[in-house]
Image: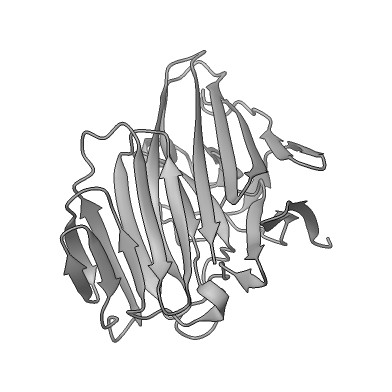
Amino acid sequence: MAKKCAVLKNEYLQADILLDWDYRRSRYDWGGTVGQVTMKGHTFLSGERNTSGGVGLGGVGLTNVWEWQDTHLYDQTSIADFFPLPGVGLLKRTDTNPFLFTKDYPVEPFRRIEEVTEDRVSIRTLPHLCQGVAMDMEKSYHLEGKTLVVTFRVKNVGPEEIHATEFCHNFFRFDDRQIDSSYQLFFPYSIQPELRRGELIMTRDAYRLGAFDGPTESSAFWIRGWQGLSSHWMRLENQELGMSVLMEDDVPICRFYSWNNFNAFCPEVFAPIDLKPGEEVTYTRKYTFDA
């Protein structure tokens, strides 16, 4: 199937919304992604690349991810039966091994309804009941001046409670400039990193990337310090290029993780999705660009 792209454009920004980027794997939301944002000829996003130059898990631009808070749905699924993954579809369990997000499971995708107008793109993922779980989900994109606004609506329409998270895998790369210590991420609080691999160059409320881990050519770490906030913001900038993006989330976050390599700077803020049957949540992520 050919790629389908909807373009949102105003006097400041152009955002290319990929409704289909030939993604058929079991990690990322199939319901569209932001392929690129352009401002005054400057670009802000990249595609996922691994150390060997391959596409990794297939992420592009601003790709959001849904995860269950635990693996009990998978654990209770018999081999050759299906378990649901929000944003993706029904995944088939193929062996007795533990669940791995890096593994490709066979997918029967959820059905979706796309609505594209001159100033808004909306993708609704229709509910499909599986193991007592069913979610009616909608994701929409629109521009407000220099800001790209992404709105999520999730309703629990099944008989079981839902305990999941959503985050955006932000693949940032300004003007195709390789990721190095010229990129700096700022926060409105004192950060407390828990390093897994790689090195950080820290100040009280910001970090730059130091040396990457040798075997993986990447860095990965958790950030704490946000506890108690009712909303969240962070600002990625590259002063040498004169470019930045402010990311704002109007939801009390539950985790913060950062994964980075030479190709992409990827801060990830997790939103909690805890819904009893019949409950609904709506929240937004805002990206304000400057160049």
Q: Residue furthest top?
A: 278
What is the quadrant of residue 194 in the picture?
Answer: bottom left
What residue appears at the point 59 percent right and 48 percent down from the top-left corner?
148
Q: Could you say where residue 60 lies in the image, as x and y percent from the top left?
A: 59, 64
Look at the image and tell me whether residue 92 can be seen: yes
User: Exactly how many numbered labels are in the figure?
Assistant: 0
What is the quadrant of residue 18 in the picture?
Answer: bottom right
Look at the image and tell me whether residue 87 can be seen: no
Q: Could you say where residue 234 lies in the image, as x and y percent from the top left?
A: 36, 52
Q: Could you say where residue 86 lies in the image, as x and y percent from the top left?
A: 54, 39
Q: Could you say where residue 196 lies in the image, as x and y percent from the top left?
A: 22, 67
Q: Left or right: where does residue 223 sit relative to residue 284?
A: left
- Which colouring convention does the figure follow? one colour
Task: Looking at the picture, tell me which residue is in the foreground, 104 or 161.
Answer: 161
Q: Is residue 192 above or below residue 36?
A: above
What residue appears at the point 38 percent right and 44 percent down from the top-left corner?
270
Task: Looking at the picture, tell me which residue is in the foreground, 85 or 77.
Answer: 85
What is the quadrant of residue 179 in the picture?
Answer: bottom left
Q: Is residue 264 above or below residue 53?
A: above
Q: Is residue 290 above or below residue 188?
A: below
Q: Quadrant of the N terminus?
A: bottom right
Q: Quadrant of the C terminus?
A: bottom right
Task: Looking at the picture, tell me which residue is in the foreground, 280 or 45.
Answer: 45
Q: Left or right: where does residue 69 sit relative to residue 67?
A: left
Q: Is residue 6 above or below residue 166?
A: below
What residue appears at the point 43 percent right and 16 percent down from the top-left corner?
276
